[in-house]
């Protein structure tokens, strides 16, 4: 069997048609997802129910035939495994116990004590490794330390990550200590996903854009480089995708600085810019705006072709620039895939 298309792109091959998957492809825009989630009870129960989590991971593969499946879980399960309290307020998003003091940092569990909580996630990966079509790549993931820390410090999502920036300014030791604890635990978590059958892993740094100057180097680049080096030492052929969302110029050289095999690009930069500045040095993933999955029409077809054409000269994995939203029309996903594959 020839190697899976996503793995070929991640090794730098330029394919006539880019492989495709979609951030949040298992999600509320799909009626079958909403039904399984209702059956599970709530979002966290779904994450920790290996059979049902595998089922929702498979739903978009059956419906659309994407080239990759991403493990169904959440970046906030790791803080929970470290000892943070985690719950989801309906319609509002995640809530966690806050962490702002040295004592609260010291009370977290160590990196070797996370696996009791996370065992069901590894089981989901094992089921998927067995059940996915042979041509589909299985992607595992975790949040990057800065993004995860921003939720742990504030106890919720924040538009500007102000509480995390404030702790960084007021108590650098506690802040850096938290980044290190998350980075070390992330290596163990992702390594277990790989042992269970994940073929690629992706690091989501959704809030990297609010780190400026030296902070971007210290808290987006360096932790990613450390995690990637540790993972590659254990799993030398493991391809890794990094997503420093809204990094802007920070995308340039990010793959070299961190050792990532691919940089995922959000839709705040143009595909032409990213092709010229970022793809020159390796595989990129992205970057159609998710709003086209809501609005559809001519613009969807035109912008999809634009992304494909802009990245056609180098290794490329087609994706959205961020997750598909709950108000998206599932038929627009079909049209996007047809436009990418030239059907
Ligand atoms: O992409 C996928 O399909 C894989 C599963 C996945 C989820 N979350 C499922 C999810 C992945 C990779 C994530 C990553 C994640 N989670 C990120 C980084 C990527 C990004 O979107 O920037 C972040 C910041 C989180 C934290 C999180 N989880 C938030 C802020 C929210 C609430 C916002 C929302 O969309 O409701 C979640 C909930 C969540 N995670 C849902 C899903 C499918 C929706 C939950 C539901 O069914 O109600």
Image (spheres, rainbow, N blue to C red):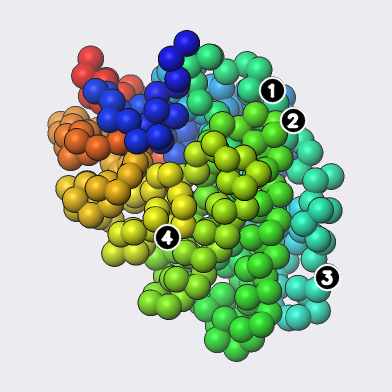
How far, Cα to Cα, is label 2 from label 1?
Answer: 6 Å
How far, Cα to Cα, is label 3 from label 1?
Answer: 33 Å
Rendered location of residue 248, percent (x, y): 30, 62
**Total marks placed:** 4
Q: Secondary structure at mark 4?
A: helix
Q: Secondary structure at mark 2?
A: helix
Residue located beneath label 2 in the image: 123
Residue located beneath label 4 in the image: 257
Q: Which mark is residue 107?
A: 3
Going 39% across and 65% down the picture, which residue do you hit? 209
Rendered location of residue 196, percent (x, y): 70, 31
Answer yes or no: is residue 47 visible: no
How far, Cα to Cα, is label 2 from label 3?
Answer: 28 Å
Q: Which mark is residue 127?
A: 1
How far, Cα to Cα, is label 3 from label 4?
Answer: 32 Å
Q: Is there CB contact under 8 Å for labels 2 and 1?
A: yes
Q: Quadrant of the C terminus?
A: top left
How far, Cα to Cα, is label 4 from label 1?
Answer: 34 Å
Q: Nearer the viewer, mark 2 or mark 4?
A: 4
Going 19% across and 50% down the picture, which residue do you hit? 276
């Amino acid at each position: 069997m020839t190697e899976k298309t996503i793995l070929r792109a991640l090794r730098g091959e330029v394919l006539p048609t880019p492989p495709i998957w979609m951030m949040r492809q298992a999600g509320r825009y799909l009626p079958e997802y909403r039904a399984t989630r209702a059956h599970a009870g709530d979002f966290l129960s779904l994450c920790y129910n290996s059979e049902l989590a595998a089922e929702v991971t498979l739903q978009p593969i059956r419906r659309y035939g994407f080239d990759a499946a991403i493990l169904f879980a959440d970046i906030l399960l790791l803080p929970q495994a470290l000892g943070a309290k985690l719950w989801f307020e309906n319609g509002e998003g995640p809530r966690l116990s806050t962490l702002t003091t040295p004592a609260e940092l010291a009370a977290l569990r160590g990196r070797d004590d996370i696996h009791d909580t996370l065992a069901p996630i590894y089981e989901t990966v094992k089921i998927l490794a067995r059940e996915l079509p042979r041509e589909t790549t299985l992607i595992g993931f975790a949040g990057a330390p800065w993004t995860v820390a921003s939720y742990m410090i504030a106890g919720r999502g924040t538009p500007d990550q102000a509480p995390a920036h404030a702790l960084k300014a007021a108590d650098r030791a506690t802040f850096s200590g938290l980044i290190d604890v998350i980075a070390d635990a992330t290596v163990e978590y992702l390594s277990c996903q790989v042992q269970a059958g994940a073929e690629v892993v992706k690091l989501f740094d959704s809030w990297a854009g609010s780190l400026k100057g030296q902070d971007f180097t210290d808290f987006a680049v360096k932790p990613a480089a450390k995690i990637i080096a540790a993972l590659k030492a254990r799993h030398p052929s493991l391809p890794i995708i990094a997503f420093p969302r809204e990094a802007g110029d920070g995308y340039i050289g990010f793959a070299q600085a961190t050792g990532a095999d691919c940089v995922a690009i959000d839709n705040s930069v143009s595909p032409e810019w990213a092709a010229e500045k970022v793809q020159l040095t390796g595989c990129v993933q992205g970057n159609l705006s998710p709003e086209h999955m809501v609005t559809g029409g001519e613009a969807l077809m035109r912008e999809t072709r634009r992304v494909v054409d802009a990245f056609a000269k180098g290794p490329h994995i087609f994706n959205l620039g961020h997750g598909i939203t709950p108000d998206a029309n599932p038929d627009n996903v079909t049209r996007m895939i047809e436009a990418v594959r030239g059907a």
